[in-house]
Image (spheres, grey):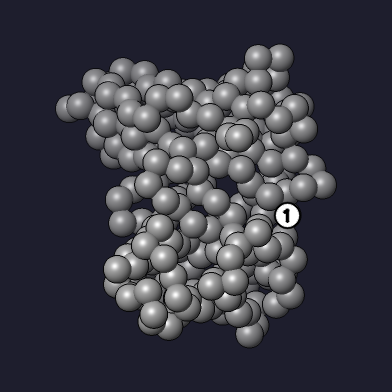
Amino acid sequence: DQQVKQNSPSLSVQEGRISILNCDYTNSMFDYFLWYKKYPAEGPTFLISISSIKDKNEDGRFTVFLNKSAKHLSLHIVPSQPGDSAVYFCAASAFGNEKLTFGTGTRLTIIP
Amino acid sequence: ETGVTQTPRHLVMGMTNKKSLKCEQHLGHNAMYWYKQSAKKPLELMFVYNFKEQTENNSVPSRFSPECPNSSHLFLHLHTLQPEDSALYLCASSQDRTGGFAGNTIYFGEGSWLTVV
């Protein structure tokens, strides 16, 4: 029973365009959401997070949007750069049970 | 240089072997974690240690035995593994055991690729 789902295993985007990665969750107790980025042969690195009291959080080229009613979050990367090519993991946690639950990841490829 | 280092990076072992994975964090954190990533599956939390004490065992088979001698070091002892245990094993650390929540960022090591033959 996967509580965090990333339904697109891969995504290709032209350099300079917007990349949109999606994540859905089923557990209504989740109230904190994170995105991690992973290059081959490296561990995941934290990218950006959002609390359930917000619907948007921005950090440079990266913006995360949260739609609580739809139990959906998305990561927008604008403009996309070749160095953004990586696997992106969505993760969620609930206050009082801080164990992170991860999605299966989406492989983003930026085409020069 | 990563703040969380894992050795070995690659390990091939037979089903009757005993081996260990080692993790060291240089971040002054108090919590350490083992995660498992199998092909096409989400990262799965295996164990959590906080101030050297195990606070979570996520129903992991006893053929995986963690050891945390201090807040900076974490081991995963492996014994009589099965081929389906082949995976990437990731060590991680955070300031405390609420890692992943409200800014208490979890930092991952580069992982140890384990192949059981």
Q: Identify whether A90 is placed above or below B9.
A: above
Quarter of the image for residue A72 reads top right
Q: Residue at x 77, y 32 (%)?
A: A29
Residues B59 and A97: in front is: B59
Left or right of B70, for residue A82: left
Quarter of the image for residue A18 reads top left
Q: Identify whether B17 is placed above or below B4.
A: below
Q: Residue at x 32, y 25 (%)?
A: A11
> Which quadrant does the N terminus of chain B fall into?
bottom left
Q: From this viewpoint, is residue B33 visible? A: no
Q: Residue A36: x and y, percent?
A: 49, 43
Residue found farthest to the left: A112
Chain at numbered mark 1: B
Q: Residue at x 71, y 71 (%)?
A: B54
> Which quadrant does the C terminus of chain B fall into?
bottom left
Q: Residue A56: x and y, percent?
A: 62, 23
- Crowdedness near tag 1: few (<14), some (14–19) or many (≥20) residues, C-alpha within 10 Å: many
Secondary structure of the residue carrying tag 1 is loop
Q: Residue at x 40, y 25 (%)?
A: A8
Q: Residue B75: x and y, percent?
A: 53, 78
Q: Identify whether A26 is placed above or below B63.
A: above
Q: From this viewpoint, is residue B91 visible? A: yes
Q: Identify whether B51 is placed above or below A23.
A: below
Residues B84 and A87: in front is: B84
Q: Amino acid at mark 1?
A: Thr
Q: Residue A58: x and y, percent?
A: 56, 28
Residue found farthest to the top: A69
Residues A18 and B74: in front is: B74
User: Residue tagged by mark 1?
Assistant: B98
